[in-house]
Amino acid sequence: MTTAGTGPGTSTGGAPRVAVIGGGPGGLYAAALLKRLDPAREITVWERGAPDDTFGFGVVLSDETLGSIEDTDPAVHRALRAACVRWDDIDIVHRGRTLTSGGHGFAALARRRLLEILAERCASLGVRLRLRTEAPPAAELAAAHDLVIAADGVHSLTRAAHADAFGPSVTTHRCRYIWLAADFALDAFRFETAETEHGVMQLHGYPYSPDASTVIVEMREEVWRAAGFDAPGTRASVDRCAEIFAGALGGRPLRSRASSRSPASSWTAFRTVVNDRWSHGNTVLIGDAAHTAHFSIGSGTKLAVEDALALAACIQERPADLPAALAAYESERRPVVESTQRAAAASLRWFEELARYTGQPPHRFAFGLLTRSRRVTHGNLRLRDPGFTRAVEEDFGCPPGTPPMFTPLRLRGLTLRNRVVVSPMDMYSAVDGVPGDFHLVHLGARALGGAGLVMTEMVCVSPVGRITPGCTGLYTREQSEGWRRVTDFVHRRAPGTAIGVQLGHSGAKGSTRLMWDGMDEPLPAANWPLYAASPLPYRPGAGQIPHQLDRRQLDTVREQFASSARRAQRSGFDLLELHCAHGYLLSGFLSPLTNRRTDAYGGSLERRLRFPLEVFDAVRADWPAERPMTVRISATDWAPGGTTPEEAVEIARAFTAHGADAIDVSTGQVVADERPEFGRSYQTPFADLIRNTLSVPVIAVGAISSWDDVNSLLLAGRTDLCALGRPHLHDPNWTLHAAAAQEYEGPAAPWPLPYRAGSRPPPAGRTDAPKPRLTLR
């Protein structure tokens, strides 16, 4: 291994020298792999602790990780296999009832035994182990070695010493937890809740040997303090935990690895570590030094071991270019780690908000727990444990043989035949606000495609309320007649499909070019004036500064919404949605980032809500009482100082109190400098928050792409409807194809009669070739 360009520590002909800071699983395994790949390497591992020092008791390893170890070091794999205990079940204990889900497949062993196996392997290969020895500073090691591997954990001194190079971010979370052990083997991976006078506490437990189990007790910080766990005395904490969870333990005691460093040192709060870069010169971070993922998905040791595997492989593949090898390592591992961290964050949030779910029916609670990270889904569980999954479906109300997404939902006088919504998507294809042939074909095709509810794009209530010259409206008779043509087609040719209209006003985001000509770019000519809650442009320095609406103009806008609602009724729409999201006019009143008014419509949330609620009331008064009305909100602005999740709950509460039948929970697009946390189903936690805090129907949106996601979100009680946009652009028949994929044929997803022959995919390629009669091996 040569290290061209790495600085003064490079070798000049002697044996390559590698320093490893930290003797945890990642550091030891990296040392063993690199030594095995090149016995000439001089590798030294520094570990400041004793051989049996460890913060936890048991380690869970996946079959995938064990398989990778088998491929790279069969000796280590054999030792691990011999030490592991295996089980398949997860027990979920909630309010005295135990629900068991099987077919999961876990392997675990004592963390101490794992370290022994890896240390023994290192010693047998000639790696130098310096235990109970503090490593020299990373910079000093880097000057004397070809490679420095910093595996020094979540509190990495290496990362801290070179923070300017690595760009770390460490987030401390809201729960306190303690690692404990019980001297008997649990029968399964066990999750149990305890609803105490101080708040909800939870137990995570699993066996790691034939006679021992790891037990983690976790609770919110405020519960921890209220229960007195912050008082001195680790032994008292341990005994209290054993008492609270005596049922799970069969009355047996718990033990800890207590430390005397501080009164409550055995309790800690989880820290999520993220780094902008994982290498600096010839120093590289692996494992918890580079990244952490919450223990509730059992990923820490797995990620560290996989980091070691990838690092060794990249160095082996690029022996003459260490910078390229380290770049390849990070490029390979970062997407995997970020995906794991997203899943871990979802799991962590679920446990932080556990009190929100304790009132759910037992099967829904259990399903929500199992699918909390979104890595386990309804489809996974049907394969792993069909009986458990059927019980969850029955509790949800699925008719026999009916997937969750094809159960009906009633809102006022409207019954939606399934839970799929074609999300509002601006098409920018109208002329003078009139929907034409394009809209008829676009919306008609998606109605024929089986969705329960098809939503229009944002339909503007006035000419100056348009986003672009191509936006549709409902402020003229011609526009109303154009929409009537669309709704008549849907009701006549796709009976059972509902069609809804979304009414809105562009506010500060108007008078811009068509999306494909420059999204949010101002028109080069023929601009119209903009009006907003405050005179703040959406993109500072680009486009107009909007006029702040005065009292008379507020009244005018309110009447424009009501007038458009009356036209929507005449146009034949089944449902109306008021657009109060994405930085458009009404959203601009709700967010503190866009509402700087000092009158009765600005300041506190109550005042910021006033005008949107006035508009809602005016529209509700002119919208038929039997037809439902929903409201779309941005539950976060993804920007400092913006709408908080807690405020989003209060906004939803206010609209519901005024008669909203469901809250369509979106996020962002309120300010141009937002920083969304994109990912699969990334907006659904906000729908979950509102639904399970207020017990009101919600519509979830945001990167929901598969029918398995839809089923999972519904069964877990995270939403009542799922709105999908891009999937319906890709496939207008998305719902019908989802039904076919699940072998569902029923009233919730009927194929149009002219299309019925296409309800199964046509054969591809030749299928009449003779089958071989003999196979010789």
Image (tube, rainbow, N blue to C red):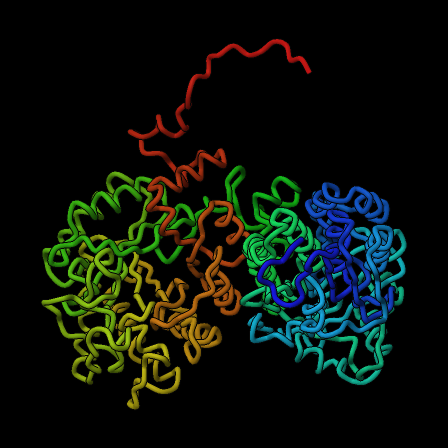
Q: Quadrant of residue 256?
A: bottom right
The residue drawn where x is 48% and y is 49% is: 710
Which residue of the protein is positioned furthest toward the front in this rendering? Answer: 13
Q: Residue at x 24, y 55 (%)?
A: 516
Question: Residue 600: x percent and y percent?
Answer: 30, 88
The residue depicted at 38 percent of the width and 57 percent of the height is 411
Q: Nearer the viewer, residue 16 or 507?
A: 16
Question: For this rendering, which residue is in front, 594 or 673?
Answer: 673
Left or right: 628 as drawn, with respect to 324: left
In the picture provided, is 3 more to the left or to the right than 105? left
Res. 129 visible in picture: yes
Give how far across and how far down residue 759 sits, in percent: 39, 30
Up/down of 361 relative to 356, above or below = above
Identify the image quadrant of residue 567.
bottom left
- Give the image location of residue 340, x and y in percent: 59, 57
Left or right position of 739 against 486: right
Which image quadrant for residue 41? bottom right
Residue at (71, 82) in percent of width and height: 225
Considering every residue shown, the one lying at the far bottom of the view is 598
